[in-house]
Amino acid sequence: MSSFRPAPAWLADAVFYQIYPQSFADSNGDGIGDFDGIRERLDHLAWLGVNTVWLNPCFASPFGDAGYDVSDYLNVAPRYGSNDDLAELVDRARGHGIRVLLDLVAGHTSDRHAWFTASADDPGDHRYIWAAEGAPDGFVPSPGSRPGSYLPNFFAFQPALNFGYARMDPAEPWRQPVDAAGPRANREALRTIMDHWLGLGLSGFRVDMAASLVKDDPDKRETSAIWTELRHWLDRTHPDAVILSEWGEPEVSVPAGFHTDFFLQFGGPTDGLALRSLWSNGSGTVNLDWDPLDCFFDPSGKGSPRPFVEAWRQASTALGDSGFISLPTANHDFSRLNCGPRSAEQLPVAFVFQLTWPTLPAIYYGDEIGMRYIPDLPDTEGSVLGPAYNRAGSRTPMQWDDGPNAGFSTSAHPYLPVDPDPGRPTVAAQRADGTSLLHLVRRLIALRAATPELGPDGSVEVVHAGYPFVHVRGGRYLVVVNPRQEQTSCPLGDFRTGRALEASGVATDGGTLTAEAFGYGIFELDR
């Protein structure tokens, strides 16, 4: 493992909060969320207790893929405001004790980026991957005077930046080595982009599809080398900044240089099994190539925590103290917790697990009040990825109150439709109800902050790997979660529970622990 500077001290205490900016808060009534809207809602985030915000891409873009098709990395999209507005948001957030991270799209640009329009007319430009003649499988015909075709990432309008190929093939002469001029220029561009935004006060980046840079790189060795190089640069020039990866394989990405990687719905040899085995209940965003499984947080009680625990144990053993793993409630590409058959009453037990497991928690905006995944929405800015995979359902407007558009916007045409359910949860209603999910999440975040044993560095001992799932943190705190809709019990062995720090429907009788349906508890131990 390369010798990196230790992660900034603040990262170990991070509670991430992901904001999809076009859906969070609209300050000017145009139907699209913006920086000023986020700034006006910082009090909510500070009250909740989150301390690190990650914004989905907010750079200039045609928005064919919701901003992941970047046309200018050094300027923000006007629909969100100006660069100065972003700087003001970052400054105000810092005043609330909140750091802000941007989303860096490293592997491709929009076909409207100046780099690409120049490359499409210049056969000597190798910032992108061009086949000089014809259109090999997967390539897109050139839109300019340059003959041949280019390789895209995901959508035809997203030409892949050329970071080289790990393996050469005489039959594919467009393959260039990673140290060719085009790949070197792109690596330098990443440093320029990162340096620009870090200089304006941002605290780091979540890197989109971080494993995808070098092509035909089966062991990710060459892609890892790029991030190792960038991490050493970051350690020298911005030692308090962090990079988080959308990779989904922490045992590879963190040794490569990332401070943190997320468990994702994809990634690694199991294609994201760890996260899906917790939350994915076959509704919402579903890749038809996924093997069917019963997730653990499902009322049927047919799932198991073992796939997650085993993946976490393997990754955390590989990482040691070199970095962190983050566990999200959801993300902009994956179903919300409140999805399909999973109801609001099942969400507290999920948050108790997420906020007490030794990972860095990432809360997707709106999950703290139990916002629903909304099915059957129209394809919006590239949201549909397959017949059962519409990401729009996880991107609907934040529900602030009972006003028009749930307080998100005064526009008659918001970015996406608001949840039509008249009983939809809102921040205002849950703030007023001390028994709400929002208050529970706030208390759990505060408990985590006040109790180092519940953080990422505290030890974990699994006492019962089934229903209920029982584990001990730091040798001092017993955590019980029962996602099942039926009462369930297990032996406690020599453990004896003391004061309940947070509990609902959990009791002990001698050496037996009983958890009611969807029961949970965090207890001090008497030993």
Image: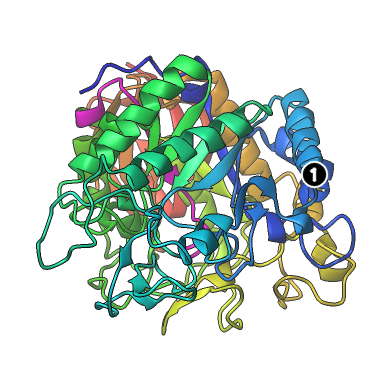
Count of numbered marks: 1
Position of residue 461 in the picture relative to residue 115 (left or right): left
Magenta-drawn segment = 318-335
Residue nearer the viewer, 199 or 353: 199
Tell me the kind of residue under disc 1.
Arg
In magenta segment, residue 512: no
Identify the residue at the far left of this view. Answer: 170
| Corner quadrant of residue 454 | top left
Q: Where's the N terminus, which quadrant?
A: top left
Q: Position of residue 199 (x, y in %)?
A: 64, 26
Give the left or right position of residue 99, taking residue 350 as reference: right
Is residue 492 at all visible to an observer of this figure?
no
The location of residue 316, given as percent across then percent down, is 26, 31
Q: In this view, does 366 lie to the left or right of 218?
A: right
Q: Name the residue: 80% across, 55% down.
A: 429
**Quadrant of the frame with the C terminus:** top left
Residue 308 lies, in percent from the top left, at 27, 48
Instruction: Tell me which corner region of the image, top left, top right, bottom left or bottom right, holds residue 160.
Output: bottom left
The answer to whether residue 178 is visible is yes
Most common secondary structure along the magenta stretch: loop
| On screen, residue 304 above or below 249 | below
In the image, what residue occupies the spot 69% across and 29% down? 200
Residue 377 x %, y %: 60, 81
The residue where tag 1 is placed is 41
Nearest the eye: 481 or 289: 289
10 Å neighbourhood of mark 1: few (<14), some, or many (≥20)?
A: some
Q: Is residue 330 magenta?
A: yes
Residue at left offset 26%, top offset 75%: 289
SS of the residue at dot 1?
Answer: loop
Residue depicted at 38% across the width and 56% down the height: 124
